[in-house]
Amino acid sequence: MSDLGSEPLLWRLGVRIESSRDVQLLDWLVGHVGANEVRGAAYRRRNRLQPRPDKVAEELGIRPPDELQSKAVEPWKSDPMREHRAS
């Protein structure tokens, strides 16, 4: 069981993080409107899955800067099955 104090703030906002772009966008959103607003928007947008940061920004009525929208996406985690299939 993990201690909530040891988890990074971004992981406790109820937002799905799948790439480095998601981390940067979520960090920008928190800096722009605050963690409580982001958490609330993520809760409102949630269905079965946690929403992605771009959907949270949409819920908040915020358009992220162009440099965050057009940034190349790097995988957040490697896919072990894809690596296994490739070998």
Image (tube, rainbow, N blue to C red):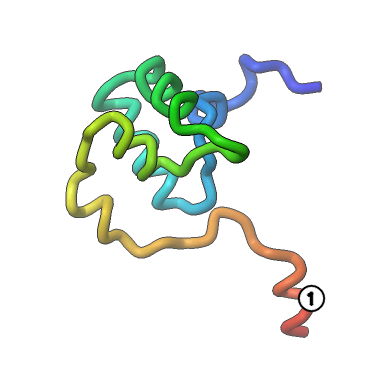
Residue farthest toward the front in the current orientation of the protein: 47
Q: Secondary structure at mark 1?
A: helix
27 or 63, nearer to the observer: 63
As drawn, is 66 to the left or to the right of 79? left
Residue at position x 32%, y 33% from top?
59
As drawn, is 9 to the left or to the right of 64? right
Give the tally of numbered discs: 1
**Crowd band around label 1 with a 10 angstrom C-alpha radius: few (<14), some (14–19), many (20+):** few
- Whether 4 is drawn above or below 72: the answer is above
Where residue 84 appears, as percent x and y from the top left, is 79, 75
Asked which quadrant contains residue 57, the reply is: top left
Q: Which residue in the structure is indicated by mark 1?
A: 84
- Whether 45 is drawn above or below 2: the answer is below
Residue at position x 64%, y 21% from top?
6
Where residue 62 appears, as percent x and y from the top left, is 22, 35
Quadrant of the image containing the N terminus: top right
Asked which quadrant contains residue 4, the reply is: top right
Residue at position x 54%, y 29% from top?
14
Quadrant of the image containing the C terminus: bottom right
Residue at position x 50%, y 25% from top?
13
Where residue 55 appears, as percent x and y from the top left, is 38, 41
Where residue 77 appears, as percent x and y from the top left, is 62, 56
Amino acid carrying label 1: it is His
- Whether 81 is drawn above or below 22: the answer is below
- Whether 41 is drawn above or below 85: the answer is above
As drawn, is 78 to the left or to the right of 21? right
38 or 7, nearer to the observer: 38
